Image (cartoon, rainbow, N blue to C red):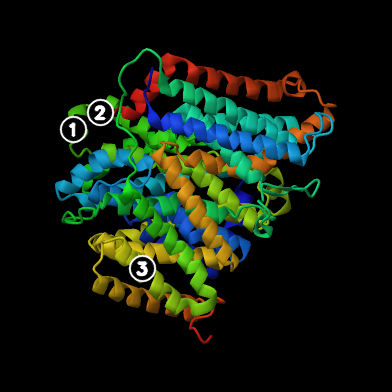
């Protein structure tokens, strides 16, 4: 027996996990009965469907008689993880900084960080792009569109 | 019908609204033209900027954004062989070949002219069929609605590409995400993980940007794919007499195919361009020219996909049931403006409904008027290296999300959904069906529960009555067809073909 498609096996396992967790949560919301449904009724049905599909997907990913895996394996290495961290980090950094530092500084720091992090820009290039875009953001959103957001660290 | 159209044009045709239509078309094209950003990501990024407007102005701007993004996508497909969505993969086949022969301008104008003709006919069809369909829908009870939504979801899955089982799983996951928040009947908080920020449910825009825009940025960074921007030279913009002669029939045929398929619940929009292309190839006396720069191969699919985009509004607006992920986004936008799409919109807010219908045509017109003269500028934009563009995309996405709710929490949630989206994509799950489920989740549950209350808890209510029974029957047949190996094989070849 071999795993013929690792993606389907992992995906199926994920669905089983989510389905199971949902089913447990649904019980806490109350199931009720068909005549008098409680908030957990519909989610429980969906959870059961997810469990079924997840199990089916896992089974279909296993080849009981085969000897070798088909297709390419999972494509996720350190570089993928790094890119994920850079993009997700950009959004989180923006959210963290904006209430404290104001629009200009937030845009500048976020863009410079993802620019360097992505390795598509040189440090100097990233700083230049960040400066230009931050000015555009403040002029466009704060002063032209009058977005109600603090522009500078000291307000304004 | 004409009274309604006049009403629509008076509501939508004010100078301010025309300005918004123009701004929408411009912005939509501007973002949509960027490689990798399809209509879904474009609309998701620009959506928050329409929140502050009057409902009608916002919808008009949104229509402009929608058509602009679709048009921008075709431009990138033609010039750089980079389709932003499934529908424009077909445009690449002959459009890019035309571009390589220095006929990029002709290909782009053909796409614009075809889209405009198709959009005009589609708008007329929408106006003609909206009233009778709405009358039909007003008689619908909860069991009919439940059956119709199920049919819509199954239809969407059956026509989507990729694994069927996985698409179903994505729809269900979307339905569950849609249920998160405070239950409207009992006040119970579901799936909120104890976070008060989730009491009102998951923000639609957060989900959309996380799943689509975030995903596009991520995959570009991973692949280090800096698209080839040695844009092909544009010799002439206007099609010559021979071109015009050759594009008329394909435009009309494409419009017919698209109009029919667009109404069907499901991914009719991308299907229509595939079908239009194969029809053109079949009826052509020179099928060997296809794939080598045949103008018919651009005119047919582009008209079909625009006509389908237009008629897809029919079920979205009259029944409140989106047939495609883009329609789900538009529906989400309507809800943000406190408009519950469905048969009642037309009677309770006629100026809004007909204004939107009129604005679609205005959006199409703006596109032609703006973009034919601006093609040169768009081509220049494509020669800006991607490494300089993507920080801007991230920034606009962040500001857009923040502006939609003024809460940093939304940005964190976007990152969470972005990561989820990347995991799903890595495991080859398509995130698009998830959005359909997300929008329909609360409605589906509501109608399901109500139908059960009315029938005293008997599930037979869904099969006892002819209308829901027929719809669920069709849905069941579709599921069976998908499971049968023969159909599965033909479905795979359909998407692998051409």
Marks 1 and 2 sit apart, C-alpha to C-alpha, by 9 Å
Horizontal side, residue A112 vs residue B171: left or right: left
On screen, residue B403 above or below B97: below
Chain for disc number 2: B
Of residues A143 and A84, the one nearer the viewer is A84
The local crowd at label 2, few if under 14, some if 14 to 19, many if 20 or more residues have their Cα within 10 Å, is: some
Q: CA distance from mark 1 to mark 3?
A: 49 Å
Q: Is residue B148 visible?
A: no
Q: Give the mark toward the camera: 1 or 2.
A: 1
Return the mark for residue B284. 2
Question: Residue B273, percent across and down?
Answer: 37, 36
- Chain ID of residue with mark 3: A
The residue labelled by disc 3 is: A113
Q: Quadrant of the N terminus of chain A?
A: top left
Q: Position of residue B26 (x, y in %)?
A: 40, 63
Tell me, yes or no, if residue B113 can be seen here: yes
Query: Mark 3 or mark 2, which is nearer to you?
Result: 3
Which residue shows up at 45% across the image and 74% down it?
A106
Question: Which marked residue is nearer to the observer: mark 1 or mark 3?
Answer: 3
**Pointer 1 with pointer 2, Cβ within 8 A:** yes
Residue where numbered disc 1 is placed: B289
Q: Nearer the viewer, residue B274 or B287?
A: B274
- Sequence order check: which comes first, mark 1 or mark 2? 2
Judge from the rendering whether residue B291 lies leftward or rightward of residue B412; answer left or right. left
SS of the residue under disc 1: helix
In the image, residue B201 sits, relative to residue A155, either above or below, namely above
């Amino acid at each position: 027996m071999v795993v013929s498609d690792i993606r389907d096996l992992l995906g199926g396992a994920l669905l089983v996990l989510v389905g199971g967790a949902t089913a447990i949560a649904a019980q806490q919301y109350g199931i009720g009965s068909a005549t008098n449904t409680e908030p957990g009724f519909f989610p429980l049905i969906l959870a059961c469907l997810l469990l079924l599909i997840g199990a089916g997907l896992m089974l279909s990913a296993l080849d009981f008689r085969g000897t070798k895996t088909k297709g390419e394996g999972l494509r996720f290495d350190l570089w993928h993880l790094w890119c994920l961290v850079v993009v997700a980090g950009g959004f989180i950094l923006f959210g963290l900084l904006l209430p404290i530092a104001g629009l200009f500084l937030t845009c500048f720091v976020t863009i410079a960080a993802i620019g360097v992090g992505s390795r598509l820009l040189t440090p100097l290039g990233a700083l230049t792009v960040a400066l230009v875009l931050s000015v555009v953001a403040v002029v466009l959103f704060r002063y032209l569109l009058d977005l109600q957001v603090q522009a500078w660290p000291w307000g304004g | 019908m004409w009274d309604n159209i006049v009403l629509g044009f008076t509501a939508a045709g004010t100078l301010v609204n025309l300005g918004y239509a123009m701004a929408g078309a411009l912005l939509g094209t501007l973002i949509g033209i960027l490689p990798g950003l399809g209509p879904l990501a474009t609309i998701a990024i620009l959506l928050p900027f329409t929140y502050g407007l009057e409902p009608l102005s916002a919808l008009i701007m949104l229509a402009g954004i929608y058509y602009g993004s679709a048009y921008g996508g075709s431009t990138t497909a033609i010039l750089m062989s980079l389709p932003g969505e499934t529908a424009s993969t077909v445009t690449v086949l002959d459009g890019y070949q035309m571009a390589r022969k220095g006929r990029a301008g002709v290909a782009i104008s053909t796409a614009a002219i075809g889209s405009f003709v198709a959009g005009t006919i589609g708008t007329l069809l929408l106006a003609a069929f909206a009233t009778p369909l709405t009358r039909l829908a007003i008689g619908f009870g909860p069991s009919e609605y439940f059956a119709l939504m199920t049919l819509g979801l199954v239809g969407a899955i059956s026509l989507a590409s990729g694994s069927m089982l996985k698409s179903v799983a994505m729809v269900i996951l979307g339905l569950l995400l849609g249920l998160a928040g405070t239950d409207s009947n009992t006040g119970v908080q579901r799936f909120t993980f104890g976070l008060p920020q989730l009491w009102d449910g998951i923000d639609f825009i957060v989900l959309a940007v996380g799943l689509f825009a975030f995903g596009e940025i991520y995959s570009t960074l991973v692949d280090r794919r800096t698209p080839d921007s040695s844009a092909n030279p544009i010799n002439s913009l206007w099609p010559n007499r021979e071109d015009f002669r050759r594009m008329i029939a394909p435009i009309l045929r494409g419009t017919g195919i698209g109009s029919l398929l667009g109404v069907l619940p499901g991914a009719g929009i991308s299907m229509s361009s595939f079908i239009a292309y194969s029809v053109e190839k079949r009826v052509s006396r020179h099928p060997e020219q296809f794939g080598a720069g045949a103008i018919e191969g651009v005119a047919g699919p582009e008209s079909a996909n625009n006509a389908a985009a237009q008629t897809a509004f029919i079920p979205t607006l009259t029944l409140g049931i989106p047939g495609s992920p883009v329609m789900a986004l538009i529906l989400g936008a309507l809800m943000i403006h406190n408009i519950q799409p469905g048969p009642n919109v037309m009677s309770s807010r006629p100026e809004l409904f007909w204004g939107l219908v009129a604005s679609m045509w205005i959006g199409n017109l703006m596109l032609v008027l703006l973009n034919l003269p601006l093609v040169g500028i768009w081509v220049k934009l494509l020669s800006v290296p991607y490494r300089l563009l993507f920080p801007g995309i991230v920034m606009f996405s962040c500001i857009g999300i923040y502006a939609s709710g003024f809460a940093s929490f939304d940005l964190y949630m976007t990152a969470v959904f972005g990561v989820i989206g990347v995991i799903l994509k890595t495991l080859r799950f398509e995130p698009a069906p998830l959005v359909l489920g997300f929008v329909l989740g609360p409605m589906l549950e509501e109608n399901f529960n109500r139908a059960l209350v009315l029938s005293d808890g008997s599930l037979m209510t869904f099969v006892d009555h002819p209308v829901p029974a027929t719809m669920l029957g069709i849905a069941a047949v579709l599921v069976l067809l998908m499971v049968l190996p023969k159909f599965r094989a033909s479905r795979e070849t359909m998407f692998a073909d051409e």
